[in-house]
Amino acid sequence: MTISLSALDLVVAGPNGTAAESLDATSRTVLRLDTLGYRRVWFAEHHGTELSASVVPSALIAHFAA
């Protein structure tokens, strides 16, 4: 039996972090998950959350899929 693994990333920026740092960290995570054989990475959409750099999942998907 084969199990397909997926991950959820909230693209969270730390209290002193920037959105750019958060996206860079997520990029490293996505690459690592790919090498580990994960089949999907999901991005959550959060509005009005100060620590979230993930507002438009479709833009994140296009960026990280490239």
Image (tube, rainbow, N blue to C red):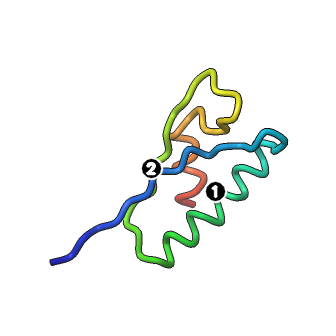
The residue most toward the left is: 1
Q: Which mark is residue 26?
A: 1
Q: Which amino acid does label 2 sit on?
A: Trp
Q: Using the image, determine if residue 30 lies above or below residue 22.
A: below
Residue neighbourhood size for the residue with mark 2, other residues' Cα within 10 Å, grouped as few (<14), some (14–19), many (≥20): few
Q: Position of residue 33 (x, y in %)?
A: 50, 69
Q: Position of residue 55 (x, y in %)?
A: 59, 32
The residue most toward the front is: 15
User: Which residue is more in the foreground, 15 or 11?
Assistant: 15
Image point (65%, 43%), residue name: 12
Residue occupied by mark 2: 42
Name the image quarter holding the N terminus: bottom left
Q: Quadrant of residue 25?
A: bottom right
Name the image quarter holding the C terminus: bottom right
Q: Position of residue 63 (x, y in %)?
A: 60, 52
Q: Using the image, determine if residue 39 lies above or below residue 45.
A: below
Q: Position of residue 64 (x, y in %)?
A: 58, 57
Left or right, 57 with respect to 52, comes to left
Image point (50%, 78%), residue name: 35
Q: Which amino acid does label 1 sit on?
A: Thr
Q: What's the distance in space between the residues labelled 2 and 1, CA to CA? A: 11 Å
Image point (49%, 45%), residue name: 43
Which badge, 2 or 1, is on the more N-terminal residue? 1
Image point (56%, 63%), residue name: 30
Q: Quadrant of residue 5?
A: bottom left
Q: Is mark 2 on a helix, strand or loop?
A: strand
